[in-house]
Image: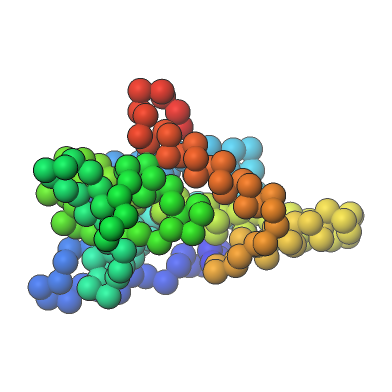
């Protein structure tokens, strides 16, 4: 959880000979993420403690490194690979497009995008898309928790119904929290579907 004084726990330091934890195109990804977060916060940016906003670049870098380490772990299953001859992405017997593998997290998919994918341009692009999407999810969820908690406190003495609603939002945005509300599931399905199309059909210009 984000706080006024520190970001999430720092990523472990790499061991000698281990896979580098800096993702490809780190600067490109971070710049895109900063833009996405700016849009996510919108007019509520002023509600976030300035200390947290100042920490965002560091937080983004830490989350990217943590993801890269996780995806390159020998213990990680469901690794996505690219068949150069058949020109398709695979994970075990499952095959899919770049958009399908990235967006699958919205409906429970848990795929890894390891460094070996970067041996081809399309694989490198997939790693970049996946890193951006997963990092965005993590950080915006943390920020959503900060916002909801702040609004819950603001309305505590003014509007009990609103305060209760924001407390529920804050609870839902806690780490490892799972919502069983049908509206939440429907939102996830729609987000995943649109994200998949945006990645696989760049010509449509969707974001």
- Image position, residue 175 (x, y; %): 55, 67
**Residue 49 at what x, y percent from top left?**
59, 55
Measuring 74% from the left and 62% from the top, which residue is drawn there?
167
Q: Residue at x 50, y 52 (%)?
A: 106
On the rendered structure, is 12 left or right of 85? right
Q: Quadrant of residue 12?
A: bottom left
Q: Position of residue 77 (x, y in %)?
A: 30, 69
Q: Look at 19% across and 57% down and name the residue there.
A: 115
On screen, 1 above or below 130?
Answer: below
Q: Is residue 13 above or below residue 35?
A: below
Relative horizontal placement of residue 15, taking residue 154 as reference (left or right) = left
Is residue 206 something that shows in the picture? Answer: yes
Quadrant of res 203: top left
User: Which of the pair 94/194 is nearer the observer?
Assistant: 94
Who is closer to the viewer here, 36 or 78? Answer: 78
Residue situated furthest front in the rendering: 93
Q: Position of residue 18 (x, y in %)?
A: 15, 71
- Quadrant including the N terminus: bottom right
């Amino acid at each position: 959880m984000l706080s006024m004084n520190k970001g999430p726990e720092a990523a472990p330091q790499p061991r000698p000979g281990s896979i580098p934890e800096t993702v490809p195109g780190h600067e490109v990804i971070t710049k895109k993420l900063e833009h996405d977060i700016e849009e996510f916060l919108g007019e509520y940016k002023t509600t976030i403690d300035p200390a947290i906003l100042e920490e965002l670049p560091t937080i983004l870098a830490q989350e990217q490194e943590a993801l890269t380490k996780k995806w390159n772990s020998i213990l990680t299953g469901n690794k996505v690979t690219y068949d150069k001859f058949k020109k398709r992405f695979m994970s075990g017997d499952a095959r899919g497009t770049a958009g399908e593998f990235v967006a699958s997290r919205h409906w429970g998919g848990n795929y890894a995008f390891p460094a070996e994918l970067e041996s081809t341009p399309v694989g490198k692009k997939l790693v970049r898309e996946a890193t951006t999407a997963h990092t965005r999810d993590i950080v915006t969820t943390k920020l959503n928790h900060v916002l909801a908690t702040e609004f819950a406190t603001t309305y505590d003495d003014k509007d009990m119904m609103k305060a209760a609603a924001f407390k529920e939002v804050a609870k839902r945005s806690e780490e490892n929290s799972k919502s069983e509300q049908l509206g939440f599931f429907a939102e996830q399905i729609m987000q995943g579907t649109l994200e998949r199309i945006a990645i696989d059909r760049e010509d449509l210009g969707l974001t």
